[in-house]
Amino acid sequence: MPAQAAAADDAAATVAASAGTSWAETMRRKFDLETYTARLTTQLPALRTTAAARGADEAAALKAETDAQAVMDKAVATERTMYARHAGAKNAAKLAKKALVAAKKQKPASKTRVAKATAAVKKADDLVKSRAVIARTSTATLTLTRTRHAAAAKKLAAATTAHDTAVKTVAYAEKRIASWPKDRAALAAQATELSEAVVTQARVKYSTTQVYGVTVNRVVAFSFQRMIDDAAKAGVKLSGGGFRTREQQIALRKSNGCPDVWTAPSSSCRVPTAIPGRSLHEVGLAIDMTSGGSTINTRKSAAFKWMAANAGKYGFVNLPSEPWHWSITGS
Ligand SMILES: [Zn+2]
């Protein structure tokens, strides 16, 4: 299996084997999958070119093998003919010898007939010898054509394998790229599930701190500050709203028009808002990002583009449905 295909299998296995995976692991795999798919998409044209070239190689190898087969078939026929002619010459020589014996026995003796018969025997023997040489040469030629055909057949087998592999690699890449949104959705669902576990576990004991006026969990404060600083160096002013209490989350559910506070899914609210107890904001591990005082609500903004390209390095993942919401799990 090609290396890319093996990597894709790893990614698929990650999605399948979600149970018991830590959120950190899920995050890492999510990034891997994203990077991997992007790389495959970039590589696809070259993979297709390679497959086409291997196809041409195989066609050329097939033609060479067919030609070698024809040459060999011809050599087989030639060899058969040459041995038949050798056998014919041997028969003729036998008859010439019989004729000579008969000539010698003739009474009264005829010197002329004996001389003629002797000359005929010599000529027939010479022909046997020369045809034996030709027959042996035809065998050598046949052996050579067999060797050449075997080599051509071996090349054809290798070219066929190379072509098949290249075609399979293209098919695999296409399949992986096509299944990417599904994989991504599966990972997002996993992240949502894991976020609840993160909130439950982190809530037991955590503390928050301020980073440029944004309240975040202490465990992400350092990387969050670095991200803000690095963005500023790149000319992108970032800030946001991080921590909120459970009470604030409940109030938000109400003000964002969720059908009810505790059970309606986040997506049923006018503005998607997680069920209290499931939002990473409640432990300061999610931040709704702003830039220049406004919420980042479009993927076209410079701030979003910078975040999309860089936030992963600081451990923040975007929730695809909300350009402003960045957290440690992407939910
Ligand atoms: Zn949020």
Image (tube, helix red, strand yellow):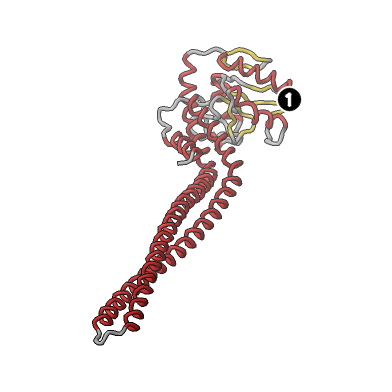
Q: Residue at label 1?
A: 236
Q: Which residue is drawn at 68% across and 32% down?
A: 305
Residue 187 position in % (x across, y down): 50, 34
309 horizontally vs 36: left or right = right
- Image region (quadrant) for ligand 1: top right
Task: Please tell me which residue lies in front, 108 or 36.
Answer: 108
Task: Please tell me which residue lies in front, 157 or 43.
Answer: 157
Residue 174 drawn above or below residue 281? below
Q: Does the Cβ of the disc 1 residue fall within 8 Å of ligand 1?
A: no
Residue 204 drawn above or below residue 9? above
228 horizontally vs 330: left or right = right
Three-letter residue code for mark 1: Val
Task: Please tell me which residue lies in front, 209 or 314.
Answer: 314
User: In which image quadrant can residue 317 be found?
Assistant: top right
User: In which image quadrant can residue 19 be found?
Assistant: top left
Residue 172 position in % (x across, y down): 50, 45
